[in-house]
Amino acid sequence: EQKPKRTPSSTLAKSTVSYASDVVKREFIWEVQGLSWLEQQLTQEGRECTNSELFEVDRTDECSTYMLAFSPRGGSLQHEMDDQFEMFVDDLCGTLALIRCADNYGTNLCYRFFVRDARGDFRPWGEARRVAVPARDHVACFVGGPDLETEAKGLFGLTFEELLGSEWVVDDSITFKVEIEESVVFSHPSAVPQIRLGKADVTFEQKTPSVEVPPSTLQADLLSLLIEGRHSDVSIEAVYGEAAPATFSAHTNILSQRSDVFAAAFSHEMRESATRTLTVTDVPPPALKALLHFLYTDDFDEVQKVLREEGSSEASSSSGGASSSGASGAAEQSIAQ
């Protein structure tokens, strides 16, 4: 038993997998005014940090929501504003932090913090950090910041008093910016056996079916119609001097299309409509035959061939297409008369 063969109409030409097609980028600016009063006001509020409004990054995921928290002395980040943004360890401390809404699904993040200086330019604080937040069995927040994991706290290592007199505070205000890139993971390991995040794309190359085109036989087929007289609808009769008359079975459609002279003759000068005969009296039969061969084949070689076979004195007295063309032209002129 033979193994069956495939006959594909297309073949794979290129395969691509992208791990950045779902990455969403966002930046958020937060200004804190009255900075010199912040520490006293937070004491009255019973907390050690203030927080921004919520902002979204990937709008297709309701948990892709963030806030910024700022603690002037690098204290606790428990802001006591929204329970969904406080699900992290109580003793987590830092000066500036990015907090993501509590979730048990994973996500991939790249974030970086900036602070505006006295010239109005945003200067980076720390390097960009790219993290893979893993899926969890319990709901929790992701928290990231430049000095969360260091003992020394403070913006650029400054104490709060030093910060108030620095280039980062203008008119008792400080302005932060965070740039975030996020690729949300919508699958949970507990629900699917394997998580695959790459987006595949393929390009197929169409395979054109192999068709063998035979050589053209149109010229030979048309000449065969003339020589054999098959399906003819008109007779062309050559009567010239003492030469034996000759009759050719032809086709009005072909001759009318190929020659304006024949088209006019068929329209107005047909001798007898019943016999469908056109008589040519002042062109030798070989010349008329040569003309018909040319009209059916569009090939002057056929004209020369006919004249040689017929022993035409005109063909033997000159070479090339000039005499052949002359014989064909004379035949057409006779028909026109």
Image (cartoon, grey):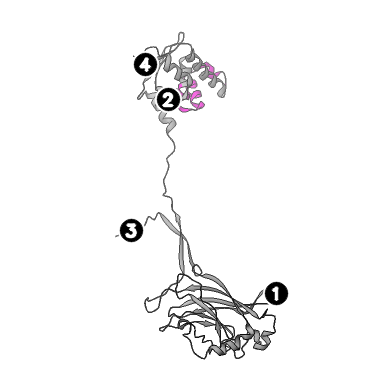
- Indicate the secondary structure of the residue bearing disc 2: helix
Q: Which comes before the other along the chain, label 3 or label 4?
A: 3
Q: Secondary structure at mark 3?
A: loop
- Give neighbour class at mark 3: few <14, some 14-19, many 20+ (Cα, 10 Å): few
Q: Tell me the residue at 46%/67% (across/down).
A: 199
Q: Which is in the foreground here, disc 3 or disc 2?
A: 2
Q: In this rendering, which labeled residue sits more in front, label 3 or label 4?
A: 4
Of callouts 1 and 3, which one flags the residue occurring earlier in the amino acid sequence? 3
Q: Which residue is mark 4?
A: 276
Q: CA distance from mark 2 to mark 4?
A: 15 Å
Pinpoint residue 245: horizontal percent, then vertical percent. 42, 12
Dot 1 amino acid type: Arg
Q: Nearer the viewer, residue 11 or 183?
A: 183
What residue is at 49 percent from the left and 75 percent from the top?
Answer: 65
Distance of label 3 from label 2 (alpha carbons): 51 Å
Q: Which residues are magenta?
A: 292-318
Q: Is residue 73 left or right of residue 222?
A: right
Give the mark nearest the N terminus, 2 or 1. Answer: 1
